[in-house]
Every structure is written in structure tokens, then in C-alpha cells.
Image (tube, rainbow, N blue to C red):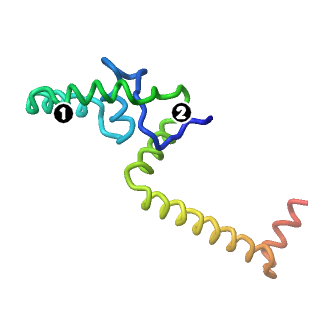
């Protein structure tokens, strides 16, 4: 079974206590310090209910698998997918349209009767 990159995980590698705040930061892309400060403030404001929710999440959520992301860019991409999947799909479609257009331009230049291109190809032989 492979790990899902769109699922919430406890981030034990970057945790201070149980990994919930670092997991939220990894999931959303928000700085972990802001998540921790926000959690502490909410715990004080709600008379401890957030602490109870924190402990429940720590008991229920899975640990983040090692090597879930290939690189920092990969992690940023998946954070964007989780934040707005529709936008991510549109970006991928746009990228593929751009690649398709560029390949069509290359194909047109290659198959057209372009004497300069023919001369360049002959010089490479």
C-alpha cells in the first residue's frame, strides 16, 4: 500500500511534542511556528478544548511516512494540490497545452520546407 500525498499525517520528524502542529503545517504549507502559536492561543481562549482535540488527532492520525516527497518542490506542489485541487488541475492542463503547442511548433518547423533548417541538419551529418 502506497502513501497518499493528499492525506493528513502527523509529522514526527519536525515535531515538538506529538507532531500535530507540524503535520498541519506540512499539510497546509503554513509556517509551523505560526501553527504552534495559533494552537497555543486557541488552547487558552477555549479553556483547553483545543488541547483535547490535539490529543485526539495525535491518537487517530497516521505518522508521515519517510520519503513521502522527493524534494522541497514536490512538497510545495502537493501542498498546493491539497489547498486548491481545481487550480492545480488547471495548472497541469495549462502546462500540457503549452508543451503541446511547443511540440507542434517544432513539428511544423521540422516538416516544412525550410532551407535554413535543412542546411543546419545537413551540417550536423
Question: Residue 90, relative to residue 18: is it above or below?
Answer: below
Measuring 45% from the left and 40% from the top, which residue is drawn there? 7
Quadrant in which the N terminus appears = top right
Question: Residue 115, relative to residue 78: is it above or below?
Answer: below
Instruction: State the residue in front, 108 or 62.
Output: 62
Measuring 58% from the left and 67% from the top, which residue is drawn there? 98
Circle nearer the N terminus (2, 1): 1
Measuring 47% from the left and 28% from the top, which residue is drawn there? 64
Quadrant in which the C terminus appears = bottom right
Q: Is 59 displayed left or right of 103 in the figure?
A: left
Residue 13: image location, x then y, percent: 43, 21
Element at label 1: helix
Instruction: State the residue in front, 24 or 87.
Output: 24
Residue 58: image location, x then y, percent: 34, 25
Disc number at residue 68? 2
Q: Is 25 displayed left or right of 103 in the figure?
A: left
| Mark 2 closeness class: few <14, some 14–19, many ≥20 residues within 10 Å | few
Element at label 2: loop
User: Among all residues in the image, which is located at the extreme right?
Assistant: 125
Disc number at residue 11? none
Q: Is 97 displayed left or right of 113 in the figure?
A: left
Disc number at residue 38? 1
- Residue 95: name its quadrant: bottom right
Measuring 31% from the left and 17% from the top, which residue is drawn there? 17
Amino acid at each position: 500500500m502506497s502513501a497518499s500525498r493528499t492525506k493528513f499525517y502527523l509529522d514526527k520528524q519536525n515535531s515538538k511534542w506529538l507532531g500535530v502542529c507540524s503535520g498541519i503545517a506540512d499539510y497546509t504549507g503554513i509556517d509551523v511556528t505560526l501553527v504552534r502559536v495559533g494552537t497555543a492561543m486557541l488552547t487558552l481562549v477555549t479553556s483547553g478544548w483545543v488541547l483535547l482535540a490535539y490529543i485526539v488527532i495525535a491518537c487517530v492520525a497516521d505518522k508521515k511516512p519517510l520519503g513521502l516527497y522527493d524534494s522541497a518542490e514536490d512538497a510545495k506542489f502537493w501542498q498546493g494540490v491539497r489547498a486548491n485541487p481545481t487550480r492545480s488541475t488547471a495548472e497541469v492542463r495549462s502546462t500540457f497545452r503549452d508543451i503541446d503547442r511547443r511540440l507542434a511548433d517544432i513539428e511544423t518547423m521540422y516538416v516544412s520546407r525550410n532551407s535554413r533548417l535543412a542546411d543546419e541538419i545537413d551540417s550536423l551529418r
